[in-house]
Image: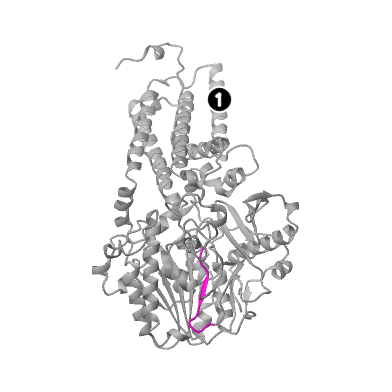
Amino acid sequence: MNTPPFLQKKTFLHSPLLHIAYTTTCLTVIYSLCRLVFYLFNLSHFPEAKAVYFFDGIRFDLSAIILLNAPYFLLMLLPFKFIASSKCRIISNIYLVVVNLLAVAANLIDTCYYPFSMRRMTFDIFHFAGETGNIGGLIPLFLRDYYYMIIIFLGFVLLLLGMIYFSKFIDYKDFILKGKALIAQILIRVVVLGMLVLGIRGGLQYRPLSIVSAGEYGGVEYAALILNSPFSLMNTLQSEQLPERTYLNAKECDREFSVKREIFDNQYFTPPKTDNVVLIILEGISSEYSSVLADEPKDLAGCTPFLDSLARQSITFRGMANGQQSIEAVASILGGIPSLMEKPFCQSQYATNYVSYALPVLKRQGMSTHFFHGGANGTMGFDRMSRTAGVDHYYGMDEYPYRRRDYDGSWGIPDVPYLNYVAEQLNHTEGHFFATLYTLTSHHPFKVPAEYDQKVAKGNFPMQHAVAYTDEALRQFFAKASKSEWYPHTLFVITADHTNFEGATDVDYRRHRYSVPMIFFHPSQQEVFHSDEIMQQVDLMPSIFGYCGFTGQFVSFGHNVFDSSTPRFAINYLSGTYQFYISQYLIEFNGDKILKIWDLENGNNEVSPDQVLQIQEYEKLMKAVIQQYSNGLLHNQLRLN
């Protein structure tokens, strides 16, 4: 093929430096297009996106581009003529295509996965893949459901190949000129190298760009739009070392927020006799799917008729999850330890710390501890984390006797047969017990067994259909359990691991992203009420102790909600930003400064600190919680003598 006329002029630069500029520019355009695809497929999650977020994202793109392509850029800076050889050029082009196609693939995967995770992927995705034994069976399902991403990916393949094709018209035979030009060429390379380092840092600011930086630009709700997936992955590549926090001196921090739990008053009512506890964790089912628990206008409600009937006979709270992933939930719910860092606690270097958990206290008092999950054994690390927290008997898909018959082909055993199996197992359990039941079906690919496809409500999108199926499974479980001898003296606590609004539109994510059920049902209780006080997942174990009148000492970042003297708040962590919910406010804090304060009860209005009279009190409590968490894990001090 002949060289185009406009490229035939001898005045066209012969420089590897021009090649660096050309490649960087092309890749920046490609990464920006990935962000546009991410935005267009997740429009409902970014209702107030601004054009400036796309320009802010270029800084993160350049950082990822230079890091990923550093070997290529350094090669172009070498003053040796071998880099002009056809063999070297072919190898460098293959490197460019492969590495950047992997980056594009990561961005496109996140485009599909974001409605589930509500954040860009971090390096723990590889731990997740390693711990999910059936990941090979899930890949075909994702490819089937998101087939259109393959077409978009092929479009990016063509763009990258086009970039490589036109790069051949940039010749770079002259590397170092003789005489005075030699010094100039060396200086130019030093300057370019400095610019590359500056690009990786993201500018001249004191600290290099990090995931936290994205929250400073657009707030936590737009951080994922500003970030790109390769940057997020590389930024969380190393094992995360929590920083030493010194917001308060040690004694003041303990006075403001102690992690020791030993007094479990119930100031609301005299609890009925309770010998057993069944803790039910619903997969992805937000409070917004319940007609009783949802906020007005209850657009997503109507999928949970049985759960609603149970809630009307129960004590309920304004529930908040401490995370957005299933893998974070067990540590928060059973262990009282939220994941206030990029890596889930159970996958962090601190997971093996000696922590004084609550379940061993109950075991020492004669209760057996059980954990039921219909997924493949080892998935999400549930078995390991539950045992770490004090569970003695773990039941996964391997223990299920009819797994060949009932396996759903993707995740495990559907909820109806599995919950019936759990009821039977509990009937054969001797003595008092604490049993955790984790449901499964209300998860992508939202596969409802054929015999129930027409029996439960369809809703407006697949998640609602799956939620209705899980609700039917709960109905059958309680129907069977109610006939057992242990039922009248058992406390049932129902919550969810996180929320899942896949397919929903017009969701108030700032208010409802972490909104999960918090239901206390006892067949013999007389008290029924709903509290608008915040209750977070880490509050569950102290509150179970408070409800039942159990005694003992353990460590938890939650409180007993039946003690009116304890503070009511929720905390979680997303894209480098702590989110602290207290009263009607949401405080976004990056570890150094407050980024924003939102008034959630008045239309998500942003307010200034001087408008919130209690802000200093709230800020002090928030910092004490973070300091106890960071320093306690860092120094392995979350244990009692």
Residue labelled with disc 1: 188
Quarter in which the C terminus is drawn: bottom right
Q: Position of residue 20 (x, y in %)?
A: 47, 28
Dividing the picture into quarters, in which one does residue 148 lie? top left
Q: Is residue 387 left or right of residue 139?
A: right
Is the residue 393 above or below the residue 214 in the image? below
Is 316 part of what is drawn in magenta?
no
- Bounds of the magenta segment: 516-525
Residue 78 appears in the rendering: no
Q: Position of residue 37 (x, y in %)?
A: 43, 39
Q: Is residue 141 left or right of residue 257?
A: left
Indicate the amino acid at tag 1: Ile
Is the residue 489 above or below the residue 381 in the image? below
Q: Residue at x 61, y 72 (%)?
A: 559
Q: Residue at x 50, y 17 (%)?
A: 178
Dividing the picture into quarters, in which one does residue 285 lie? bottom left
